[in-house]
Image (cartoon, coloured by chain):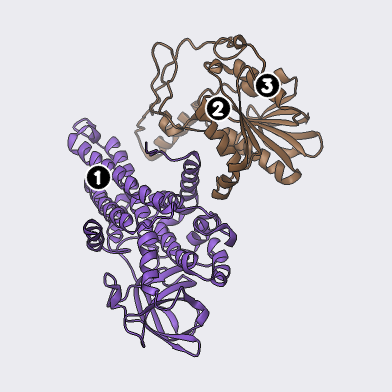
Amino acid sequence: MIDFTFSEEQNLFRKAAREFAETEIAPHVPKMEETGRNWEPVIKALGKGEMMAITIPEAYGGLGLGYVARLIALEEIAQVSVATAMMMQVCGLGIEGIVKYGTEEQKKKYLPKLATAESFATTAVTEPSGGSDPKGCGTSYKKVDGSYVLNGRKCFITNSHIADVQIVMAVSEEIPDTFSAFIVEKGMDGFKATHEERKVGMRGCNTGELELKDCVVPGENLVGKEGKGMSIAMATISDVGRGGMVGCALGLHQACLDAAKKFANERVLYGKPISNLQAIQFKLADMKIELEAGRLLGYRAAALQDKGERTGNEWAAAKYFTTEAAQRAAKHAVDIHGGYGCMEEFPVTRYLRDAYVLGPSAGTSDIMKVIVARWVLS
Amino acid sequence: MLNIVVCVKAVPEPIAASNLKIDPVTKSLPRLDIPLVINPLDSHALEAAFQLKKKYGAHITILSMGPPPAGNIVRECIALGADEGILLTDPAFAGADAFATAYTLAKAIEKNGPVDVVFCGMSSSDGATEWVGPEIATFLNMPVVTMVREIVEDQGDEWIVKADYERGYRMVKIKLPAVITVTRDLNHPKPLSFSGIIKARSKEISEWNHENLEIPAELVGLKGSPTVVTEMTRVESRRNVKLIEGSLQEKVDRFVQILSEAGVV
């Protein structure tokens, strides 16, 4: 028999994450929306709230918890702020590269500060020439006297301007089809964050471009083995990046359902709350069913990952389903609000904008279906 | 080092509790599906214990009476920083009024060993009698101060506390061991943390029934309750709308008169 219930401890994690999100993150959301920035107090709060330490081993100052705990935390935080959850999960993506593939020296150097959010991270893969096609990567490297010199440009990078530690994927200038991953630190000569994006949703989540111009990276900053950069980047994005997107999507979906239910119970038409109308009830039912289904896909993938199994396929399926479902949920929530769903004072307008940024992040829905099709046909 | 007992009650989660329906036959509120949370005022009692632990060192024991799911609340208190927990759980404890509850808790405190201070929230969000704390003190033959909003002096075994009293307050000197019931003005409870939850893994929660406490079943639960609920009704609160007519000055004068008649100004 399969036990589908959360343990007592997992329920406490959820409660702690929810309280943290409501008291420490929620107050900053209006300014994040208004300015598209204001991430400093949020990152500080994430550090103080131990949210960045979840998947870092205890030996390096982390909590040594797994991916179910991470998904729980992301889901709760995303209910309050998807922008915050997105910054948190992409930082986790950078952390994963060091935890799974880093040397002991790299772990000791970077992980303790990442655990407290004194330092923040990201992984930089996407370029104008390749996001869905990472092999189209044009950022190059060559080995010079034991160091590596990088040249190129990355775009649509979450935490581009705020990450101190960035895992950058580049292609060898000397050996064809050879990709490697490097830890590039903020402030290194030849490395800078350039254009800052203003996104339609997830405002307050920093996204932008990076430029590398003859950036000299020490040899000890190579992550894993030379030539393994593509597999490192894809493994971390598949297992952790997409897992993080599922957390963002589930939290947003729950927020949409809560807002829709509240409005439906309060809005009176024809002498009764509109929650009495079947048309509204069917939308709420659709939202609920898809949320529960998404949770099953996501938490199953996380549980398998905690057991040490490869979960790229499961996360692709979960990422596709939950992000698409969250977009539908946001539309339902806006529709239930009627004209009020167009007014910015109602949070559902933010939810709709946030939902559309979920889609292309960590791989488009079409790419997820390519992965799942391969899974079927394998 | 202080030995502190904090009495914590698992109560229905307030927002979900608004959906509770009164059973017309038993005059009770069946609570089966409503999630349980720490009684809000007990969180302040717990925080008072944590602050003393930080200052002087203390062993904090959580004591709670309830059905088995209340054990999750005890675990949560340990995750917040308590050292151990005791859950009093027994079908015989069901239906207890404040008197029987206080008697059972007092017996457990006696069994647990020497104590310096027993903290309780002033009242629970569901029963709200405010009787349990004072009754525990009576059973234990200890002094009690209720509605404490500030612990002014806490060194040694003679404390000075500030307690709400009608429209003002009173300063009370109290000798330990004692029972103190607290209000929300006392402190700001600290939040739950992931690291606290992890540390709670190794801490013990004991479960005691009436036999462990060596008290007969007739003295606990519904059988041990001298009071009984005969009627329970839902109170509907509605806003009373009054429209004030006239010029601006007339409206202001009439508004001030209404407030004065209501005793607000």
Chain under disc 3: B
Q: Characterize the local packing of mark 1: few (<14), some (14-19) or many (20 or more) Cα atoms within 10 angstroms.
A: many
Q: Residue at x 41, y 32 (%)?
A: B16
Q: Are marks 1 and 3 in contact (CB under 8 Å)?
A: no
The foreground one among B219 and B235 is B219
Q: Residue at x 81, y 34 (%)?
A: B157
Identify the image quadrant of the N terminus of chain A.
top left
Kindly state the secondary structure of the residue where label 1 is placed.
helix
Image quadrant in which you'd find residue B118: top right
Please state the horizontal and vertical placement of residue B156, each as a whole percent of the image. Answer: 82, 37
Q: Is residue B22 above or below residue A185?
A: above
Q: Characterize the local packing of mark 2: few (<14), some (14-19) or many (20 or more) Cα atoms within 10 angstroms.
A: many
Q: Is residue B48 above or below residue A311?
A: above
Q: Characterize the local packing of mark 3: few (<14), some (14-19) or many (20 or more) Cα atoms within 10 angstroms.
A: many
Kindly state the secondary structure of the residue where label 3 is placed.
helix
Residue identified by numbered label 2: B124
Chain under disc 1: A
Q: Is residue B87 visible?
A: yes
Kindly state the secondary structure of the residue where label 2 is placed.
loop
Please state the horizontal and vertical placement of residue A371, each as a whole percent of the image. Answer: 26, 61
Q: Is residue A170 above or below residue A335?
A: below
Q: Is residue B265 visible?
A: no
Identify the image quadrant of the C terminus of chain A.
bottom left
Kind of residue indicated by mark 3? Ala
Q: Colour of chain A?
A: purple
Residue identified by numbered label 3: B106
The chain assigned the colour brown in the figure is B
Chain under disc 2: B
Residue identified by numbered label 1: A337
Q: Is residue A282 above or below residue A250?
A: above
